Image (tube, rainbow, N blue to C red):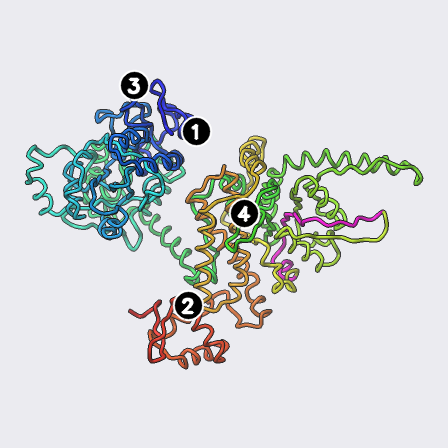
Amino acid sequence: MMGSENGHFIGAIGCPTPSPVRGIIRKKESKMIQFSIASGTGAKQKNAVPTYICKSKWYRELMARTEPLCALIEAETDKERRNALKADLPIKIPNAWMDDEAVRNNKNAHPNGTMTLDFDGLDEDPRDLWERIKDKVMALNPIEVEISASGKGMHIWVLVPQGLTLKESIPFYAKRLGLEKFADKAVSDPARAIYIVPERNTLYRDWEVIFSDKVLEAPVPTEEEIAEIRGGKALQSPAEPGPVLQKPQAKRSFPTSYQGIPFSEIVKELLRLNPAITLNEKGEPVEGCRHSAEVFLAQHMKTSTDSNVEWLSEIIPNWEGDEKAWQSAIASAQSYEVKYEQSHLLKQAIANLKDRQKQETKGTTDWRYADEEPRMPKYLPRLAKLLVEKVPEVTWPSVINAAFSALATHTFGVWFRSVAGDKLELNMLTATLAETSNGKSASYKVNEVIMQSIAKADAEALAKEEEWKSKASRKSANTEGEKRPESLIQTCMSTMSDAVLMRRLLVALIMGGMFLYSYYDEIKDLLDLSKSKRKIKAIMCAAFESKMYGKETDGKDYLSARAPMRFNTHFNGVPSDVKAWCADGLTDGYVNRISFAHIKRDRSQKFVYRDFDEKYAQKLEPSLKNLREKKGEIICPEALEVARQLQKETEQYVDETEDYQFESLSRRALIIAHRKALILYVADGCRWSKELAKFMRWSFKYDMWVKLHYFGKDLAEAQKKEVVSTHSGPVNQLQSLPDTFTFEDYRSFRRTNGLNDSKGATDATLRTWKCRKHVKQNPDGTYSKLKYTSK
């Protein structure tokens, strides 16, 4: 619950009260919507309740804390008691933002160009109403749709239509939605408060619009609609000034791209090419050169927009926040002389973007068999971004991948449920494929920092163990010596034997089930673990799921023991060596259990490392501490949902292509991606984010692409199936069939494409398609496609 004490914001958001100004992103610095929150409406407090600019973390936490109170409000039948309960709810001010600690009133409000519609006294359940009008609402580009705290109304957060005021916008939206009689006219104040409601009340929300840079287009009223609104009885007074800069209603629709390239991309590239303009991480000009950036863009883009100031105003953002200065910057295009069709910089920007498009579209459209690997997300989770800040960009995927084996070693006593319901720990086996001198050591540098604290404790334990050995060697055989110290040593040398591994595993089990870790600089170093490749692979396979592993020997001086194989490893190797090593393990699951990455050397990039100093280790420590302290089951519904989506997409792909090679590799790749997401989730204090969801999806695709790229053909041959080219990929059978086909048509197709065309195999696939609702069987025995039809 949120509350106030002497007018100060206290205790409800789970984090320290922000300072009045420092650290706050103002509207003019970002495209994200700026709005405010407060502890309440002020009805129960003597002093005015201060407002604060909202941030994503606060918003989510506040919604979670309103759950029990909203349940009471919805159950309360007495109106007065219900209103008393609602006064304890925190509020948001969606139509505007106010400086931190400012009193909530219209004078202090900075309108943000949005508004919230409030529909009360509905004559049907809000969820039923939503299902009925959903299409109408979505056509208006909503930001958020939610059920009110009472459970009897609906809030719709939208943009202010072009050319209308807040008050005029209410009848505009209400009529388009057919809800005129339910519209609350009081929402026209910029400082209007809306009670924050729990997540379960949300019918629709676009997080990227609220807390990122996604931009929506405001609806444009027709001339008839404007005339009707301003001629109505509800608006006898002159129209009020708009809350923010409202562009004049365009009589024509301007193109949004030039030579097939979006203007937004051209803007970013032009700014990047100008060394005089300093940009932030998002590629936007920083304070001090924003007006210069606006002038620069107007002058260089005049030839691609016919020097039309209205068109330019649609393209060039108002970073400065000053309307008059912004309009002046755009007007400067009129006086800037360009002797040629395009300025030199504009030509360069377009050429760069076209080259980039070619690179992105190179290969097939299906990522599984494309020539180029799936591209890493632009925005990474916090810890992933920190892991790569000291290494060359070309090594980023491999460094992040390798780091998970070290990060997982900081965990113990934690587990999660996979999509299949299996109880699994955060085991990680990782590998990097790269040619000699191509940056494989980058992962070692990062992992060394991650393992720093564990290695320090291990050094002390090793010293005790060596001291015991020294004493034992000086005593006679008949003298009873001290008992061998059972010291936990987690960082194992690459020269460790399987006997030492067994002893270390036993001690780790006694110490509570901790993980061991070893880094192998070359794949051949694994032979120090055992001279038998078969035994080494058995160890790795057992390590994927912490399976029991044992060693039984004769003689009192030899160890016989059993313990879970909690052993995280990373190894490097040139592609030819790794492929030769894995050649006899393609069908037994060895390759499936390892998360692979590769480094494709880009000689156009500088290969420079930055210092891994103590400051860097300190930045990593909070995440490592979170990993060490987490115990018990990790419950993350968001990660589980992404895993289910990936599984569903894989099943659909396999149904359509019968690419069983992909299916066999994908099962454990899905578990690996799930584990990686949970490691980052726990490391960040069990906070989920859209960046983490995108990273999990990319991680699955990247791991699968590397496996298919390096082992795909060999695996297909080993499975005695059709050789799948790493360039073309298998045929989508549904797309290749006519909309209506017979059993024999499909059987003939299978025969032509080298698939098993027996009656049983053909019938089995058709039954699977029917079950998945890809096709339906008609009364005459033919089949009709429900997906990939020609219509």
Which residue is located at x 72 percent, y 54 percent? 527
Kindly check if marks 3 and 2 are in contact, taking CB atoms under 8 A apart as contact: no
| Horizontal and vertical percent position of residue 781 | 36, 79
Under circle 2, the secondary element is helix
Residue 559 part of the magenta-drawn span: yes
Q: CA distance from mark 4 to mark 2?
A: 30 Å
* Drawn side of residue 115 relative to residue 608, left or right: left
Q: Residues within 10 Å of mark 2 (few under 14, many from 20)?
A: few
**Which amino acid, by three-letter code, is at mark 4?**
Phe
Residue 610 part of the magenta-drawn span: no
Q: CA distance from mark 3 to mark 2?
A: 63 Å
Q: CA distance from mark 1 to mark 3?
A: 22 Å
Q: Quadrant of the N terminus?
A: top left
Q: Earlier along the polypeptide chain: callout 2 or callout 1?
A: 1
| Horizontal and vertical percent position of residue 80 | 25, 30
Q: Which residues are magenta?
A: 557-580
Q: Which residue is mark 1?
A: 15
Q: Which residue is mark 4?
A: 416
Say which of 776 and 385 sits in front.
776
- The label on residue 771 is 2
Kindly check if marks 1 and 4 are in contact, taking CB atoms under 8 A apart as contact: no
**Which amino acid, by three-letter code, is at mark 2?**
Cys
Q: Which residue is mark 3?
A: 47
Say which of 748 and 318 sits in front.
748
